[in-house]
Image (cartoon, rainbow, N blue to C red):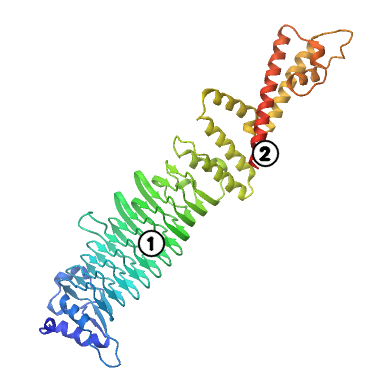
Amino acid sequence: MSEIDDLTPAELRIRRAFPRGEPVDFRAAENEDPALGDTWGAERTVRARVLRALLLKAPQEDGEIAALKITGARITGVLDLKYATIDAAIRLSHCHFDGAPDLYGARLRQLNLSKSVLPGLTSGTLRVEGVLRMTDCRMRGPVRLGGVQISGALFMERAEFTAPDDSEPVLQLNQAEIGDDLWAPEMRAHGQVRLTGASVAGRINVQDAEFHHPGGTALDAQNLNVGAHVRARCVRARGRVELRGSRISGRLDLLHAHLSHPGDTALRASSCVIGELWLRRGDRIEGALNLRRSRIEILTLEPEMLPDQVHLSNLTYTVLAPHEPAERRLLMLEREGDRYEPYGYEQLTAAYRHVGDDDAARLVQLAKQRRRRTTLTWYGRLWGYAQDATVGYGFRPLRAAVWLLSLMAIGSIAYGLDHPRPVKADEAPDFNPVFYTLDLLLPVVNFGQESAFAPDGWHQWLSYALIITGWILATTILAGVTRTVSRQ
């Protein structure tokens, strides 16, 4: 082919090594920085069109497996493999690319770009039969991997993604299909990372990663589907983390995470299905936390991480850990805003009952009634205050006994010191101040004292007060008992 008629010495080395799959290392010194590619001489420079011709022609030697293995070269021009089918493995490590490779629609056996510097990568709908490695890569422009299909794993440990502007995401993996793991601990992204609609059969590891896009969406992973765990410990995200509609079969691990998007939503995991969500031991979230309409089997959430705004309406979970007093857990329900969301209280009550803490469950239900009271009309609120003061909406029944004993003591002392006159002196029974007071207080109980004696003066007003108080007390007790029984 004409493209390889005028090969340089460096290109001749590659031409000879390719059919046998032998590596070619151009590095003059150990650990040389590939970012200094513009200082390299002709002895380390390779034209992209030569590599293209070599891969497409794929010269073979009997008994050998061809592969392109280059280390420490400067590649000039654009490596254009659009729609090409390449059977040979490709490893271009510690290389410096002058132009962004174009692999759109290509089919490759394996691609390794580890520790290389590239001005970007265009690889939409790329298919890789093995693994795709971008370990320690430095990408200086958009990496377009939308719709990529990788049978094996995608490795991006310590990779760095930047772009001259934010007109598009620095890393695009939307609609990607990865047959194994997505491995990217300590990666750095200065701009948006897009994973919308992606599917990862194995795990995602972004531990110690940084997603930096202040004022915008740092990680857009809506409708992400993960077959195992997402390990995001110690992750630092400046900008929104968007997980709406995602399905994570295992654990979403956000231990020691720092999530910051002040004035907006820092983490939105609404309408998700997640096995376990761990939000603990990290910094307090800067921005709102949105878990609305999600289903989480085990929710591990420390109150210290909660921001001022927490949206939990229609969130369903079975276990809430770690076990905290109800007073600390109620804080997250009070940060929903001015709206009354009864479902959150019911869900928290169910979580406490699941672990057998009935006292905490009752406190949550009491808080629910008090929150509901704020939404009622003035007379509804008045009746609510009466129920709260007397029996705690039925969740503090002993309070009714205290009221009853206190009123009985007041009446017994008052009537004991000054007996009311009998209606019929010759027929009246002996006066008993205790049972007379009980006759006034208890609406459905008759000890024969009330009808036999007629108080007058201030005794009469005291009788009216005891009768009215007795009816209120009986009604609130009945309402509270009915509410408690109906909930069991």
Residue 48 percent coordinates (x, y): 17, 75
Mark 1 in CB contact with mark 2 (< 8 angstroms): no
Residue 392 visible in the snapshot: yes
Q: Quarter of the image containing the C terminus?
A: top right
Please indicate whether residue 177 sits to the left or right of residue 304 in the image: left
Residue at 26% x, 79% y: name it.
86
Tag 1 secondary structure: loop
Q: Quarter of the image containing the N terminus?
A: bottom left
User: Which is closer to the viewer, label 1 or label 2?
Assistant: 2
Tag 2 secondary structure: helix
Pick out the residue farthest to the bottom.
62
Residue 246 percent coordinates (x, y): 42, 56
Residue 349 percent coordinates (x, y): 58, 44
Residue 238 percent coordinates (x, y): 33, 51
Please indicate whether residue 313 sits to the left or right of residue 453 in the image: left
Q: Where on the picture, by quarter, is residue 79?
A: bottom left
- In this orientation, which residue lies closer to the viewer: 417 or 366? 366
Which residue is under mark 1?
Answer: 206
Which residue is under mark 2?
Answer: 485
- In this orientation, which residue lies closer to the viewer: 40 or 226? 226
Few, some or many residues within 10 Å of mark 1 (<14, 14–19, 20+): many
Upstream in sequence: badge 1 or badge 2: 1
Q: Where on the picture, by quarter, is residue 76?
A: bottom left
Residue at 22% x, 80% y: name it.
55
Residue 47 visible in the snapshot: no
Task: Identify the amino acid type marked 2.
Answer: Val
Q: What mark, if any, has residue 334 been given in the picture?
A: none
Pick out the residue farthest to the top.
457
Few, some or many residues within 10 Å of mark 2 (<14, 14–19, 20+): few
Task: Identify the amino acid type marked 1.
Answer: Val
Q: Where on the picture, by quarter, is residue 336?
A: top left
The residues bearing labels 1 and 2 have C-alpha atoms spaced at a distance of 49 Å
